[in-house]
Amino acid sequence: MNRCLWRYTIVAVSFLFLGFFFQKNNQGHVEYSLSMEEKKRVVWQLHQGQLKSEIKKHLETFKKMQKKSPLFQHTNYKFLAGTIPQEKKLLTVGISLAPHPHASDLLDTLQSLFRASSEPELKYITVLVHLSDPDPGWLSQTVANISSLFKQYIETQKLLVIHGLLDSFLLPRDLNNTNHSSSCEKLYFRQKVDYALLMNFASNLSDYFLMVGNNVHFVPKFVSAIYWVLSAWKEIRWVILEFSSLSFSGKVFHTSDLSRLTSFFFLSPKDIPTDLLLSKFRFLLAQNVPIRFTPSIMGVMGNYSVLEDTCFPMDKEKVFDEPDNPLASVITDMMTISNFFPQYAYILNEECYATLDPVRGNHLTVILERPQKVTRIVVLTGSHKEGKYLLHQGQVELGYDPMEHPKGCARYTLLGPLVEGNLDQRVFYEDDSEEELSCIRLLVLATQDSFLLIRQIKVWTESEEEES
């Protein structure tokens, strides 16, 4: 990295004047390229629209659901500790707990959460705990434990503990049937009701909601990680953002979607696990594949009963080895200066690609020698230590259907925007899709009058053993 910066500094001043000249010529070329591409994209979108017309019909029906489910108009909530914050926050961290052989996990989870969060970060969140069992002895003891350990957070309105009760006669007949055919169905039923009550209460506390189980630990600065992702994705439509590979915990929603989600819980068959319902909910609202960031911001503590292990099998955290960057060529319409070649951004060493004054619409595109099943992509811009010369507004796109003229791919889909100049995301494919990736494109979204370093593009592909 030092070698890259040293070379870049030497030539930067020499090409400053040339940058103004080439930028004007570049803009005309970019506009032409994008106009041709837009035509292809419109054709593809029309084709996709025909294929997914049935999905759109379901979506319109789903969106017409009542904004506020009548189920919750007769819900009773009791404040067990704390009060509602006076200001609406960015994020509610929601946890629900029923009587459990490892009930102390909740205390460990809260301890981990507050230890991993700085005082400035805590200003952006409300931690909401829902205790779901009506047994007064259990409630009293659990609240006493929470209050003794987290008194300062309760007094400063950062932690709120509630108990919600939904009249059973209001539940749909299928859900209200207590004759569960299996122990798992009973757990699924309880989880749906408990988290529906939690999310219903949380719908006006913040802009976003983070779903958390009662047995997880957090990595330091997890609030900041979520904050910057939400800022980058603010103008892009999404339904669920996933910050861990856990099947349930780590998922972020818009609070404006929570009323639909709780209604969806009660409209679904009782034998469907909650995590599977979340996938169906995402699909119904037109997010076809998961959006998952790495590394995870939380992990599981592991205190599960045998029954829970059976009913809620945990997804194993995928362990990635070093990136394998398959053979590829790299092209760009940005101004290449001195000996900084576009390929340097893709070679796994300390070299990097440097350019001057990128304009909106510029791109750097990796064209794979043959289509690949890519599982993870990392894009790093700017200097590693100082954080200078990063791409302030950009996004990474996945390309399919390779073309020879012009060089690249016929269509692209969004993987995600850069977050503080970087991207680290898993790559998912639609169910039963045989499609493989042919291009990875870094697109500049806003002109910036400054140097730009594209430090590294890392790619992980699925091995033959994994495919089989």
Image (spheres, helix red, strand yellow):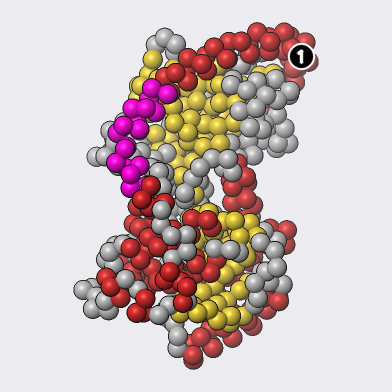
Q: Is residue 442 visible?
A: yes
Range shown magenta: 42-59
Q: Quadrant of the C terminus?
A: top left
Q: Quadrant of residue 274?
A: bottom left
The amino acid type found where label 1 is placed reads Leu
Determine whether the residue tagged by mark 1 lies in a helix, strand or loop: helix
Q: Position of residue 401 (x, y in %)?
A: 36, 21
Q: Which of 181/427 is in front?
A: 181
Which residue is drawn at the image coordinates 38% and 52% (left, top)?
A: 62
Q: Position of residue 83 (x, y in %)?
A: 65, 75
Q: Quadrant of residue 18?
A: top right
Q: Which of 185/282 is in front?
A: 282
Q: Position of residue 403 (x, y in %)?
A: 38, 15
- In the image: residue 271, left or right of residue 94: left
Does the segment drawn in magenta span residue 198? no
The rendered magenta stretch, by its main secondary structure, is classed as helix
Q: Is residue 252 visible?
A: no
Residue under label 1, please give it: 16
Which residue is drawn at the image coordinates 34% and 57% (left, top)?
A: 276
| Picture layout, residue 450 above or below residue 161 | above
Which residue is drawn at the image coordinates 54% and 21% (left, top)?
A: 364
